[in-house]
Image (cartoon, helix red, strand yellow):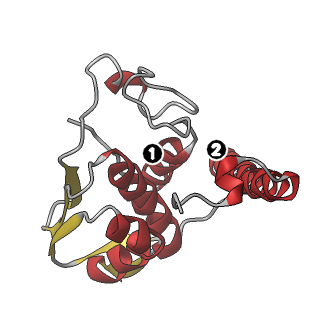
């Protein structure tokens, strides 16, 4: 055998229908995610979200943010290096959402067997979270637009699944609601 299933060869109508159904299901999941993300962003923009002020250990927050990314990171054989110390005052759930969006972006733009570094530091003046990767980087002309909703970078550099969405806009809005900011260098 050549290793291809009948569906791969496209000879069976039933198999093609199953493949089309899988693709439609994937697309529907993407649309549902976008709707949920836009609703979150609308709530954040409208000021209807109240950010809790609780002490959160960075280690616990990073663990929560990484949970949905564990399998894709493992499949891409990426390495995560941690240097996490201390805690911060803020909303655990919303901050995990923001950090998760940034980590997802890093994971998607870091090559197979690449590396992501996460450093969290607390000092008397401020708390800082730094996330770096060895991906392709961001073109200088894209930097001012990076946190705009649905901004799309140069298509030759973007992901094959479209590479656009409100994830980084949500992350920046959450940071601002915590009296913080996200910078990219």
- Residue under the image location 73 percent in, 47 percent down: 10
Q: Residue drawn 52% across and 27% down?
A: 151
- Rendered image quadrant of residue 36: bottom right
Residue at 33% over, 51% down? 106
The image shows residue 86 at horizontal and vertical percentages of 19, 79
SS category of the residue bearing label 2:
helix
Q: Is residue 36 left or right of residue 126?
A: right
The label on residue 40 is: none
In percent of width and height, residue 102 lies at: 39, 53
Q: Are marks 2 and 1 in contact (CB under 8 Å)?
A: no
Neighbourhood count class around disc 1 (C-alpha, 10 Å): few under 14, some 14–19, many 20 upward: many
Question: Which is more foreground, mark 2 or mark 1?
Answer: 1
**Residue 61, percent across and down?**
37, 76
Can you say which quadrant of the picture contains the C terminus? top left
Image: 158 above or below 123 = above
Q: Is residue 19 visible?
A: yes
121 over 149 or under it: above or below: below
Q: Quadrant of the N terminus?
A: bottom right
| For residue 133, side relative to residue 72 (left or right) | left
- Can residue 40 be seen here? no
Give 50 or 11, whichever is nearer the viewer.
11
Residue matched to label 2: 45
Residue 123 found in image quarter: bottom left
Q: Is residue 140 left or right of residue 156?
A: left
Is residue 8 rendered to the left or right of residue 77?
right
Q: Earlier in the sequence, mark 2 or mark 1?
A: 2
Q: Relative to the observer, which residue lies in front, 54 or 22?
A: 22
Packing grade of label 2 (10 A; few <14, some 14-19, many >=20) is some
* Residue at numbered disc 1: 172
The residue positioned 21% from the left and 50% from the top of the image is 133
């Amino acid at each position: 055998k050549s290793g291809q299933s009948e569906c791969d060869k496209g000879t069976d109508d039933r198999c093609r229908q199953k493949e089309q159904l899988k693709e439609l299901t994937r697309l529907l999941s993407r649309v549902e995610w976008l709707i949920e993300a836009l609703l979150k962003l609308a709530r954040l923009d409208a000021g209807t979200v109240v950010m809790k002020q609780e002490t959160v250990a960075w280690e616990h927050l990073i663990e929560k943010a990484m949970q949905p990314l564990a399998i894709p990171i493992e499949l891409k054989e990426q390495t995560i290096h941690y240097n996490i110390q201390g805690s911060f005052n803020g909303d655990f759930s919303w901050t995990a959402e923001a950090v998760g969006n940034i980590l997802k972006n890093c994971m998607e733009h870091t090559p197979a067997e690449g590396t992501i570094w996460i450093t969290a530091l607390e000092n008397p003046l401020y708390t800082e979270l730094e996330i770096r990767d060895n991906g392709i980087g961001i073109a200088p002309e894209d930097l001012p637009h990076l946190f705009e909703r649905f901004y799309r970078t140069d298509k030759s550099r973007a992901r094959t699944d479209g590479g656009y969405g409100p994830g980084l806009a949500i992350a920046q809005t959450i940071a601002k609601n915590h009296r913080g900011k996200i910078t990219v260098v």
